[in-house]
Amino acid sequence: MPYAGRCSCGAIAVRIDGDPIAVRQCWCRRCQKIAAGGPTHNAIFRTGEIAVEGAMASDNYVADSGNVLTRWHCPQCATPMLAGSSARPEMRVVRLGILDAPHGLKPTMAIWTSEAPDWAIIDPAMQAFPAQPPAPPAPQSW
Ligand SMILES: [Zn+2]
Ligand SMILES: [Zn+2]
């Protein structure tokens, strides 16, 4: 199923021709900073299925794992767009908030719950990991 999305100001647009490998929320402290206190909501897609129109800005940092995490955002309105790990260039995180509704996606996994604030309400129906979960299995088509 194709998905389309854009940043808040519309300068950056994305189109995704594929289905997500996973949809999850992340409660790590770095995500809380870009998500204004809550978790980020992220759909993981194959990098080759994502087309971006417009020039994104990025920043990066070294995660606890030693991998470099890159985060892309709109340089005009600062909407978080994509993220990726140096360990898995074949995958990209798409921030769920940029997708045009209705897209039908919802998180089924919560990660880094050990860093969630004590007021966080985490749906018990979601699979939860206190820190980084194992990487999603690679489909055979990769
Ligand atoms: Zn923008
Ligand atoms: Zn996070």
Image (cartoon, grey):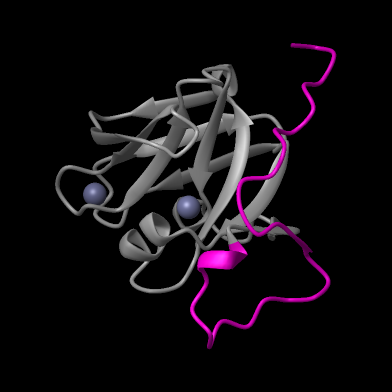
Please tell me which residue lies in front, 93 or 104: 93
| Residue at 14%, 48% in the rendered image | 76
Query: Which residues lie in the magenta part?
Result: 113-142
- Determine whether 107 is above or below 139 in the image: below
Please tell me which residue lies in front, 19 or 60: 60
Please tell me which residue lies in front, 8 or 70: 70
The count of marks equals 0
Picture quadrant of residue 90 = top right
| Residue at 38%, 74% in the rendered image | 37
Q: Where, quadrant-wise, is the N terminus in this rendering? A: top right
**115 is within the stretch colored magenta:** yes
Q: Using residue 79 as the reference point, say whether residue 46 is left or right of it.
A: right
- Determine whether 24 is above or below 22 in the image: below
Picture quadrant of residue 25 = bottom right
| Residue at 57%, 32% in the rendered image | 16
Please tell me which residue lies in front, 49 or 25: 25
Q: Using residue 60 as the reference point, say whether residue 131 is left or right of it.
A: right
| Residue at 24%, 54% in the rendered image | 9
Indicate the position of residue 112 as horizontal and vertical percent values.
58, 58
Indicate the position of residue 20 as horizontal and vertical percent values.
70, 38
**139 is within the stretch colored magenta:** yes
The residue positioned farthest toward the left in the image shown: 76
Q: Using residue 3 as the reference point, say whether residue 33 is left or right of it.
A: left
- Magenta stretch mostly in which secondary structure? loop
Q: Where, quadrant-wise, is the C terminus in this rendering? A: top right
Indicate the position of residue 99 as horizontal and vertical percent values.
51, 51
Indicate the position of residue 126 as horizontal and vertical percent values.
78, 65
Picture quadrant of residue 101 = bottom right
